[in-house]
Amino acid sequence: MIPAHIYNDKEIFELEKERLFGRSWLFVAHESEVPEAGDYVVRRVLEDSFIISRDEKGEIRALFNMCLHRGMQVCRAEMGNASHFRCPYHGWSYRNDGRIVGLPFHKEAYGGEEGFKKKGQTLLPAPSLGVYNGLIFISLDPDAEPLEDFLGDFKFYMDYYTKQSADGIELRGPQRWRVKANWKIGAENFAGDMYHTPQTHTSVVEIGLFREPKAEKRKDGTTYWAGNGGGTTYKLPEGTLEERLRYVGYPDDMIARMKEQWSQEQLDVVGKDGFMVSAASVFPNMSFVHNWPRVEEDSDEVLPFISIRQWQPISEDETEIVSWFAVDKNASEEFKALSYKAYLMCFGSGGMFEQDDVENWVSLTSTAGGPMARRLLLNSRMGMLENGQNVVEPLTSDEYSGPGSTRIGYSEYNQRELLLRWADHLERPMEKAAQLHVGTDPIQAPAATEADPSRAAVGSTAIPADPILTKEA
Ligand code: FES
Ligand SMILES: [Fe+2]
């Protein structure tokens, strides 16, 4: 049972900022957005801005976008290519790996190296950084478990969206727009809400955007939960692997590459068990979509598209949706163009599904902010009887080849999985992070005493976590 006010509550949002977003793995960019040395994009983790750059050695960096001098945002553009970033305020400049290179009037103003140790100083790197299939994640927790451990068995499903051939995906976008809705609602919807499709998206089915004549077709699909993510699938008609992938709209050259790329189990989920991944979410706020609408009128042909998105919280009642189009790098230009069209019809700021969905989420959020909502426990028990037993048992390994817990039909297991993790984070207090000093020896730094060890200076060559910089320093 879910207290209704969690979808619009200032106090809860403050806790989420600290205890959830302060230590979770969060998606920020894909490697294909920064293919060349010097390429960068600027992304946020709530209020914290990060420059995601590819440095001159080809390493991916995530640099806290705050000048070490007086804290100005160093990089003000959203994307580009630069060997250096110069702070607009007083002109300190940094290489694209974060190291300070220019400090105007270093000698006159600071007394040179003696007064301010320039050497070894860098913009703060994100405390943890991990990459899977080119997807770049950061965590503000320096002790975060390795990204791949965190993703766990969900990686099996992520490959369908992000590894259809050896070269992986490329992205277009992102589109960004804000909706007056709590960030959790979208993440829950994409994780497991097959139940809303017949009601919310009736009109999309009525106009014939999908080959399936009825939206309730979704109840023949499955929901699965694996590792720290879960999603939904559609049931495919009888046929071989190739026939089923063709049904979804994949051309034969792409099918051949999928067969080379995916494991036998990954192929079996489609070819033997007959399920194709649709929407999914990774805890806490990243989602995927895969669908295959008709793009040409008067034709039975469908075209699949993939989208990656993030539910970036602005406040307890507002979310910035960041939505990318993703496509296999090795797909033909024709496929890419049509797939992009399919995506824009369905999702993104003008997508038909998007318009349907958001109206629900805005309304839910505003209602959850009033005093009556504090008295209501929402029933979120779909798929579970009152005694805790399942309405439908999970599929056995004979029926289903993928990892995790998978069930056919409507349920809210996945939404509960997300909220269990959410509650676990909110209940666990945070350890205080150490502060970093800039340009001074720890011994001279104030407040670096035993009295408050959490404020201890990490040292004047500030960033111990970075072996490359430490070596050169
Ligand atoms: S704040 Fe950046 S140089 Fe002064
Ligand atoms: Fe929807």
Image (cartoon, rainbow, N blue to C red):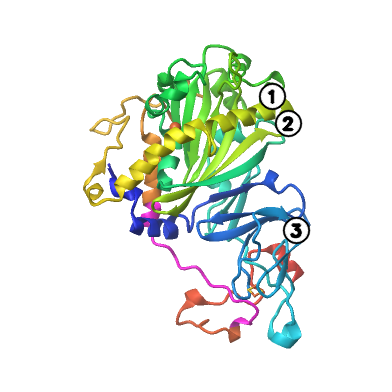
Q: Which mark is residue 254?
A: 1
Depth check, mark 1 against mark 3: the one in front is 3
What residue did someone put label 3 on? 82
Residue located 28% across and 30% down the image:
389
Q: Is residue 244 left or right of residue 196?
A: right
Q: Identify the amino acid type marked 2.
A: Asn
Q: Earlier in the sequence, mark 1 or mark 2?
A: 1
Q: Is residue 298 left or right of residue 34?
A: left
Q: Quadrant of ligand 1?
A: bottom right
Q: Quadrant of the N terminus?
A: top left
Q: Are marks 1 and 2 in contact (CB under 8 Å)?
A: yes
Queried on whether the Cβ of the residue with tag 1 lies below 8 angstroms from ligand 2, the answer reads no
Q: Identify the amino acid type marked 1.
A: Met
Q: Nearer the viewer, residue 330 or 455?
A: 330
Q: Is residue 285 above or below residue 100?
A: above
Q: CA distance from mark 1 to mark 2?
A: 8 Å
Queried on whether the Cβ of the residue with tag 3 lies below 8 angstroms from ligand 1, the answer reads no
Residue located 56% across and 30% down the image:
345
What residue did someone put label 2 on? 330
Q: Quadrant of the C terminus?
A: bottom right
Q: Earlier in the sequence, mark 3 or mark 2?
A: 3
Element at label 2:
loop
Indicate yes or no whether the magenta region holds residue 441: yes
Q: Nearer the viewer, residue 225 or 176?
A: 176
Q: Main secondary structure of the magenta part?
A: loop
